[in-house]
Image (cartoon, helix red, strand yellow):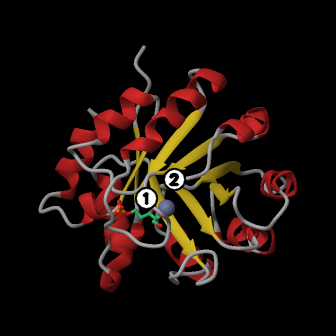
Amino acid sequence: MEKVVKISPSLLAADPNCLGSELKKVEDAGAQMIHLDIMDGHFVPNLSFGPDLIKGLRKNSGLIFDVHLMLSDPIDYIDAFANAGADIITFHVEANSDIKECIDKIHSHGIKAGLVIKPDTEATEYLKYINDIEMILIMSVYPGFGGQKFIPRVLPKASEIRAAAGPDFDIEIDGGITLENYKLALDAGVNVLVAGSSIYNAEDPAAVIKEMMA
Ligand code: DX5
Ligand code: ZN
């Protein structure tokens, strides 16, 4: 059986005037997840939002909250985002915190844990964590901003992870995913697509989500 494609629209590209309805829009269109980008102005040169916003959005949404921590010290914020309602927390292997300690702390909340790798980081060294985590997120842009151009040379990492992790493991890709390139990612072994601008800037976001899922 074909693996179901999961769509995780990135809230970063949503209209900040009406975040609640922006969440509902993608949920009604069939997206299973919402991707929440957390930036500290340190690990990446930008700031986004914190746990209070997520706690507020949680009250009216049944989406899987997919929290992507772009923080220098993710260990310090895992409790806050888990308590705010995250279902999955991913953090960067390039950050300062101990990887195993972060995984254990995320799991102590009864939620899923994942590693994120930047475009220039090889996956090989991190395959040893596969049995300890539920997802790997491959960045297909340099983290920090939405609306950047997809970097295709990261795709072999998806094939490498898929071969090592088997068919049931979640492999997510994030950055510059559009209707023009999402199939390349799926063919490489990805099954979770993050898409910000290509969904929220589209005239018909629901149509984009449906096409990516089909
Ligand atoms: C970049 C973020 C992405 C971003 C994706 O640092 O991690 O999640 O919002 O946005 P698009 O799909 O517009 O590249
Ligand atoms: Zn992200």
Q: Is residue 34 left or right of residue 88?
A: left
Asked whether the viewer can see residue 59, the reply is: no
Image x and y of residue 122, in percent: 62, 44
Image x and y of residue 164, in percent: 65, 24
The C terminus is located in which quarter? top left
95 w.r.t. 7: above or below:
below
Residue at 12% across / 62% down in the picture? 203
37 w.r.t. 199: above or below:
below
The disc labelled 1 sits on which kind of residue? Answer: Val
Residue lying furthest left? 203
Q: Nearer the viewer, residue 110 or 186?
A: 186
Whether label 1 lies within 8 Å of ligand 1 gets the answer: yes
The N terminus is located in which quarter? top left
Q: Is residue 89 left or right of residue 144?
A: right
State which quadrant residue 71 falls in.
Answer: bottom right
Residue 184: mark: none
Please tell me whether mark 1 sits on a helix, a strand or a loop: loop
Residue at 21% across / 40% down in the picture? 211
Q: Residues within 10 Å of mark 2 (few under 14, many from 20)?
A: some
Q: Which residue is mark 1?
A: 141
State which quadrant residue 91 falls in.
Answer: bottom right
